[in-house]
Amino acid sequence: MLRTTPNQDTAPSGTTPVKAEYIARLVDQVSTIIVGKREQVSLSVICLLAGGHLLIEDVPGVGKTTLAQALARSLGLSFSRIQFTADLLPSDLTGVSVYERQREEFVFHPGPVFANVLLADEINRAGPRTQSALLEAMEERQVSAEGETRPLPQPFFVIATQNPSDQLGTHPLPESQLDRFAVRLSLGYPDRLSERALLTGDDRRDALSALQPMMGPASWQLCQQAVDTIHVSDAFLDYLQALLTATRDGRWFALGLSPRAGLSLLRLAKARALLLGRGHVSPEDLQALWVPAMAHRVVPLHQSGRSTSAQARALLEATPVP
């Protein structure tokens, strides 16, 4: 288990951190560590800006853990990492009370979940009981343990990584937990030029340790609050509702999107608009986020013969923009 403490807010005095260029510089900095994956880095920042949790699914060794650490360092947030294994217990995550003889009482020792950014590494290698221990933390931003409810630090994000489900020793995440991840993405292998830069450049661990925080918890919360100021038109809401309804009518998926998913899509679209410097959302925001924000939340039709992502893209293309 790895922990880092939060840095003090580093937003320049007199500068509002909600400006698009300020958030764009955050994307620039993280992209120096995750080379050649600017689109995925931008999507990760949008997810955290919207207050959502991020699921990164890919083969080992492509930079999933490094991305989580680079985001936490750049945002100046406390960071905690826990390796999910088959024998991991819920208390290993949330914490446990230990009797201290000097004080003659039980004292609660918080687990790794008590951080701004929790990296749940290889989350699908743990059993369902331990996976479900995250549900309350992800939804309520609190933990009930030892008969007491304890709030988590704010802001709070879970960045979970998982290996492909066909690898040995993995357990599929339950639908209720998948629905709590705002975005699922895959980094993939680097292109030739990016891999050459990795091979000939500095060690990524050295570059990661040299990252300077660009914000802090308070500044980042101001950025999140700015998402609420983005204007949403009735026409955009009509488009969003048409897409949500289409996922539920049984023609495209066996199980469609929940109201929670609809709220998440709306906030993600507003976060993307803020990142791009717009004061309003557009259909392009929703279209850009549609597959990574919803494909992991729906149950496919077995007879469709297409992947969930392909089916999601087909639904998007078949739904007209009002």
Image (tube, grey):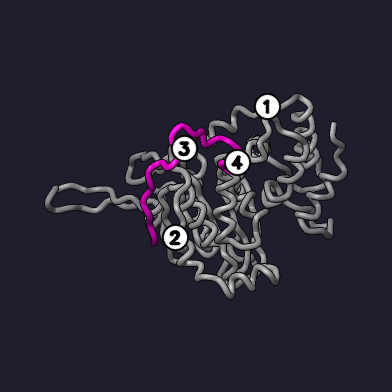
Q: Are marks 1 and 4 in contact (CB under 8 Å)?
A: no
Which numbered disc, 3 or 2, marks the residue that appears first in the sequence? 2
Residue visible at 86% across and 45% down in the picture: 317
Residue 231: numbered disc? 1
- Mark identifier at residue 21: 4
| Label 2 neighbour load within 10 Å: few <14, some 14-19, many 20+ | few
- The question of residue 201 being in magenta is answered with no
Q: Earlier in the sequence, mark 2 or mark 1?
A: 2
Q: Secondary structure at mark 4?
A: helix
Left or right: where 136 falls relative to 42: left
The three-letter code of the residue at mark 1 reads His
Query: What is the spatial separation of the Cα atoms under label 1 and label 4, in whole angstroms?
Result: 19 Å
Is residue 282 visible in the rendered structure shown here?
yes
Q: Which residue is mark 3?
A: 219
Q: Which mark is residue 210?
A: 2
Q: Position of residue 173 (x, y in %)?
A: 59, 56
SS at mark 3 in the image: helix
Question: Label 4: how many residues lie within 10 Å, few (<14), some (14-19) or many (20+)?
Answer: some
Label 2: state its secondary structure.
loop
Q: Residue at x 39, y 39 (%)?
A: 151
Region in magenta? 1-23
Calculate the distance from the C-alpha at mark 3 to the C-alpha at mark 4: 14 Å
Between residues 158 and 45, which one lies in front from this camera angle? 45
Q: Indicate left or right for 252 with 112 as reference.
A: right
